Amino acid sequence: MDRQLPPTTGYTSILQNVGATRNTGVELALSAVFAQDWHGLRWNVDANLAANRNRIVSLYGQKKDDVGNGWFIGQPIGVFYDYQFGGIWQIQDSISGAAQVYGRRPGQIRIVDQNGDGKIDQNDRVILGTSFPRWTGSATTRLDWKGIDASVMAVVRLGFMVHDELYTSQSTLAGRYNNVSVDYWTPTNPRTRNRAPTPPRRTRTSRRAGYEEGSFVRIRTLTVGYTIPGDHLGWMRARSLRIYATALDPFLFTKFRGIDPESRTDPGVPSYRTLMMGVTLGI
């Protein structure tokens, strides 16, 4: 692993065999035929579901966390270790004096004080989640009836977190810079996701909410076709002619508010929706 080093050494990282991990998992597969030549109809389904758990079991010959690298005993390799977003400070919090305890004002980010000591420092960082999904799976179904065929493939990824940088580093809410259009906080619009815009010099003192649940179900392929048998093709003297249309990534079902949960930990590029049409000639 690339182990981080203090920059004062002249280097920022070194490749080193630092510890041991354990992976355990399970994979289930199911195939079913619901109809086989029933009035000319054939219908089958194939599905699979898998889970994998990777855990760090030792570091540097002992069971001690390496906070600087974000490695924790009993946790996956690659967790989000950061401050927990607690909403936006409201005017009522200023009136009650709660915001002043932390030197905050209405409209600024509210960080959860994990130990309740009245200050926000490195001791308030916690493990928020991981980019490794708890479950992954897919399902494919196909129907054939009198020359008409249709198939759908869906993929699912459940129980993982995404750091949505599009709404953090790419959207500063500071100065006269290009910014993602968001519903930000004002005294008459007390939203709890996006803070009030501030001058550039003050943006370093606040943290935007950027960690979200990324679970999704995506229709990966959707195909519809029709096959004309050879005895209907006349002069073409072919065995068959199939006309089809396929849509790639046409639908996405998720509560994730960024561009695409499959882009993982950066703004990324959304998956293309592609429509293909073609002809297959059997000779």
Image: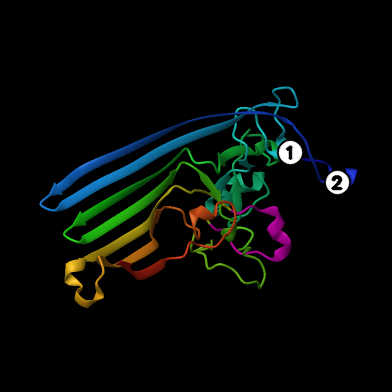
- Rendered residue at 60%/32% (across/down): 75
The x and y percentages for residue 90 are 54, 53
Q: Is residue 141 magenta?
A: no
Q: Is residue 202 a member of the stretch shown in magenta?
A: yes
N-term mark: 1 or 2: 2
For label 1, the residue is 68
**Residue drawn 35% across and 70% down?**
277
The correct choice, above or below, for 254 with respect to 229 in the image is above
Residue at the (50%, 58%) spot, across then down: 258
Q: Residues within 10 Å of mark 1 (few under 14, many from 20)?
A: few
Which one is nearer the viewer's eye here, 115 or 6? Answer: 6
**Disc on res. 119:** none
Looking at the rendering, the stretch of residues picked out in magenta corresponds to 194-208
Q: Quadrant of the C terminus?
A: bottom left
Q: Nearer the viewer, mark 1 or mark 2?
A: 2
Give the structural element (helix, strand or loop) at label 1: helix
Q: Please provide percent x and percent y for residue 52.
A: 50, 34
Q: Quadrant of residue 57?
A: top right
Residue 11's label in the rendered image is 2
